[in-house]
Amino acid sequence: MNKKTIIVASIAFINLIIIFVGYHIRPSPLNYDTASVKLDFTVPSNFPTPNAAFGQQQITPAGFQLGRLLFYDRVLSLNNSISCASCHHAASAFSDENKALSQGMKQCTGTRNAPALFNLAWQKEFMWDGRIKELQLSSHNAITNPCEIANSMAGAVDKLRLNSNYKRFFKAAFGSTAIDSTKMLNALAQFMTMLVSANSRYDKYTRHENGGIFTDTEKQGYTLFKKNCSVCHQEPLFTDMSYRNNGLDLISRDSGKSSSTHLASDIGKFRVPSLRNIEVTAPYMHDGRLGTLEEVLDHYTEGIKQNSNLDGELQQNGKIGITLSASERSKIIAFLKTLTDNDFLTDPRFQRP
């Protein structure tokens, strides 16, 4: 074996070791003795009434605590390597920080960017294409998706039954030590419903609270935002919950909402995401192709493709896109950063127990 072959073989072997160790290393065990937290779901004064379906989901401290443990526990996955929190990090508003596409079981890479998780009580549909109509079923999708947690519901439940800690948590939350998938999904939904982000500087500004001060640049950016962006990103949730094609491709690579409706008119349409916490949820778009807010505004001003399903808001008066100078873009970005809710990002109730 010549020297070059030995070097190549050695590098390959080292890489295998790194992959093995990185894949099988486990974080410290969850603290199953974490104290229950005080919680109360309240509608922020500047928010609309939550989705009607929310009334069917009663939140209790015990149910929330169980859901929090389940959200962070890798035991739900087939080989104890993936949890919900593996792709949804608290510090990045429960998005997958700095990753365009997440990696699930056995490093399987998904096809869409992991969405941020907050203010879910105001949503009627979930996922980028809206195919899921109940919050509980979004967890079902993650658990059973072979490229995510990659387990079966029965398999996840069986593993929870083998963990003696969970019997007391299910009893506290539901009055019985019996563990089943309905209760498991219910608890996860309770935790995720409590992820309310409504205490950014923007919120304090609009509610006239202490700390709600805008600079002149941010005020100008707010005015520009309302003029150019607010049709799709409506206050105070900063989304109108619609599905739109924003001209990322001349021919859409991803069928988008059409994957569930099977309508040609829905090809390339995706849910309008909330712009809250947008400063910490990069990269952007349904496939994470744009890395910065500057790139996002560059797209809307000069990068839009004339897709056959391009949204009408982006093609008016015979012109495609939004006319913004470099200075105006900078001001809009300054405003968007006032939507960062540091209280939410650091709330101890939502951190890993």
Image (spheres, grey):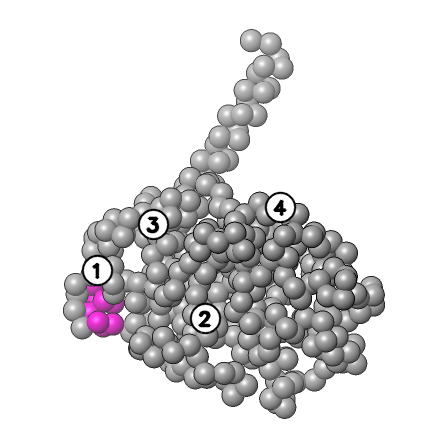
Label located before the other in sequence (1 or 2):
2
Label located before the other in sequence (2 or 3):
2
What residue is drawn where x is 62% and y is 13%? 3
Q: CA distance from mark 2 to mark 3?
A: 22 Å
Secondary structure beneath dot 1 equals loop
Identify residue for label 3: 144
Amino acid type for the residue under numbered disc 3:
Thr
The secondary structure that dominates the magenta segment is: helix
Q: CA distance from mark 3 to mark 1?
A: 15 Å
Residue 79 drawn above or below residue 291: above
Query: In the rendered image, is residue 26 in sight?
Result: no
Of residue 234 and residue 147, the one placed in the foreground of this image is: 234
Amino acid type for the residue under numbered disc 4:
Ile
Secondary structure beneath dot 3 equals helix
Label located before the other in sequence (3 or 1):
3
Of residue 344 and residue 222, the one placed in the foreground of this image is: 222
x and y, in percent, of residue 134 in the image: 36, 66
Mark 1 Cα-neighbour bin, 10 Å: few <14, some 14–19, many ≥20: some
Identify residue for label 2: 123
x and y, in percent, of residue 322 in the image: 75, 64
Secondary structure beneath dot 4 equals loop
Mark 2 Cα-neighbour bin, 10 Å: few <14, some 14–19, many ≥20: some
Label located before the other in sequence (1 or 4):
1
Amino acid type for the residue under numbered disc 1:
Asp
Label located before the other in sequence (2 or 4):
2
x and y, in percent, of residue 81 in the image: 39, 46
Q: Residue furthest bottom?
A: 208
Identify residue for label 1: 180
Front label number (1 vs 2): 2
The circle drawn on residue 251 is 4
Front label number (2 vs 4): 4
Q: Which residues are magenta?
A: 165-174
